[in-house]
Image (spheres, helix red, strand yellow):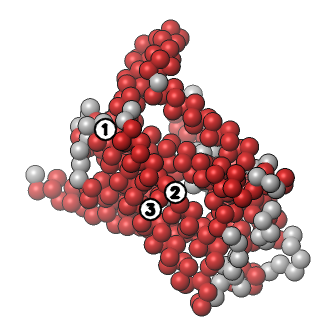
């Protein structure tokens, strides 16, 4: 199949996955009694909304600093040593691309490319391994939050207890994945299967990546990234909490720690355009069980995305600034 045709088909499928849930989100809102656009404007007020939104921006900004530090530690285990300031620039540029590429993975590809430009061809595998594990560990830890909060606050509520099962299966899936990546016995068994059933080049690359993952077998590293992930993911859940306050939603923080991880997992899947559609529909369905109306539950997600978009503009500025410098240096030559 022609690559351009394949790309067009994939985009069309993602467009359908985006628009169909978005339609149901709109229908759920518009079916409310006496709904009109004034209801949307009524969610905001200067006295109530400005301060929480500023705090939300600050929380996300701080989480980016801790997330970049975690990425730096993982890269160093792959023998890539770049200054924190340089990595922070690459991280923000990646955030910008994440907001404008389908599935929230475009920024990861950009970061891997930038690592290659900084470290040479041999750093591609190292950058890919560190960036992939950074993303996976973040999703793993935010799922751990959902399980912990579920056990503490929702275990005795039959209606809410059911939502622990998706988090539990996701958590167990991550545990199985990490076990296969870091257990030498399981890894050697998997490599043997790949040698038997996969083409030589593919098997060789996967085996090489498995050996790179083995470099993360360090108790000190795991303690450090666990602490950083706890802070990073908690701050990103706080973003939604303060966006909720901004629109007048009076809801305990425990609900956000219970529901937002599931929303984050769905948003990370490359099945829609920028995570739109499935994210809002899932959030609308979940928060309805906590007594939040359809419109505010969706607005909270859109505000959290807007906060991310505002901060990612720093990455756009750094990307354009870097591009202009490269162009200037090229011209001087």
Q: Report helix, strand or loop for mark 1.
A: helix
Residue extending farthest bottom: 47
Residue extending farthest right: 33
Residue 63's mark?
A: 3
Residue 141 lies left or right of residue 312; in this view the side is right
Residue neighbourhood size for the residue with mark 3, other residues' Cα within 10 Å, grouped as few (<14), some (14–19), many (≥20): many
Which residue is tagged 2? 233
Task: Answer with mark 2 or mark 3, whichever residue precedes in sequence.
Answer: 3
Q: CA distance from mark 2 to mark 1?
A: 22 Å
The residue sitting at 57% across, 62% down in the picture is: 237
* Whole-percent x, y for residue 289 in the image: 80, 62
The residue sitting at 45% across, 48% down in the picture is: 226
Decide: is 231 above or below 14: below
Residue 68 lies left or right of residue 272; in this view the side is left
Residue neighbourhood size for the residue with mark 2, other residues' Cα within 10 Å, grouped as few (<14), some (14–19), many (≥20): many
Disc 2, disc 3: CB below 8 Å? Answer: yes
Q: Report helix, strand or loop for mark 3.
A: helix
Q: Is residue 102 visible from the viewing direction of this image? A: no
- 285 vs 94, nearest the viewer: 285
Q: Is residue 99 visible from the viewing direction of this image? A: yes
* Whole-percent x, y for residue 42 in the image: 71, 85
Residue 185's mark?
A: none
Disc 1, disc 3: CB below 8 Å? Answer: no
* Whole-percent x, y for residue 62 in the image: 42, 66
Quadrant placement of the N terminus: top right
The residue sitting at 32% across, 58% down in the picture is: 88
Residue 132 lies left or right of residue 169; in this view the side is left
Q: CA distance from mark 2 to mark 3?
A: 7 Å
Which residue is tagged 1? 77
Task: Answer with mark 1 or mark 3, whichever residue precedes in sequence.
Answer: 3
């Amino acid at each position: 199949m022609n690559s351009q045709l394949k790309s067009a088909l994939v985009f069309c499928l993602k467009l359908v996955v985006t628009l169909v849930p978005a339609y149901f989100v709109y229908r759920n809102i518009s079916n409310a009694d006496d709904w009109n656009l004034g209801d949307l404007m009524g969610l905001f007020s200067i006295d109530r909304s400005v301060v929480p939104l500023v705090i939300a921006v600050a929380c996300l900004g701080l989480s980016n600093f801790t997330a970049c530090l975690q990425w730096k530690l993982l890269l160093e285990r792959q023998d890539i040593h770049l200054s924190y300031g340089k990595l922070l620039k690459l991280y923000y540029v990646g955030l910008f691309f994440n907001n404008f590429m389908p599935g929230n993975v475009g920024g990861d590809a950009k970061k891997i490319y930038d690592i290659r430009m900084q470290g040479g061809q041999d750093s591609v595998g190292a950058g890919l391994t560190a960036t992939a594990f950074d993303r996976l560990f973040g999703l793993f830890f935010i799922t751990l939050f959902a399980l912990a909060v579920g056990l503490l606050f929702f275990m005795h509520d039959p209606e809410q207890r059911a939502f622990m099962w998706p988090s539990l299966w996701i958590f167990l899936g991550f545990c199985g994945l990490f076990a296969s990546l870091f257990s030498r016995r399981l890894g050697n068994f998997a490599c043997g299967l790949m040698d038997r059933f996969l083409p030589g080049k593919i098997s060789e690359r996967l085996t090489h990546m498995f050996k790179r993952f083995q470099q993360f077998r360090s108790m000190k590293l795991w303690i450090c990234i666990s602490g950083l992930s706890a802070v990073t993911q908690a701050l990103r859940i706080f973003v939604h909490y303060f966006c909720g306050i901004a629109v007048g939603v009076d809801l305990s923080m425990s609900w956000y720690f219970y529901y937002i991880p599931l929303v984050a997992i769905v948003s990370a899947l490359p099945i829609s355009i920028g995570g739109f559609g499935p994210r809002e529909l899932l959030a609308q369905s979940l928060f309805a069980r906590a007594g939040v109306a359809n419109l505010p539950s969706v607005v909270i997600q859109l505000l959290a995305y807007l906060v991310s978009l505002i901060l990612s503009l720093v990455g756009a500025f750094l990307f354009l600034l870097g591009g202009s410098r490269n162009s200037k240096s090229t011209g001087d030559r």
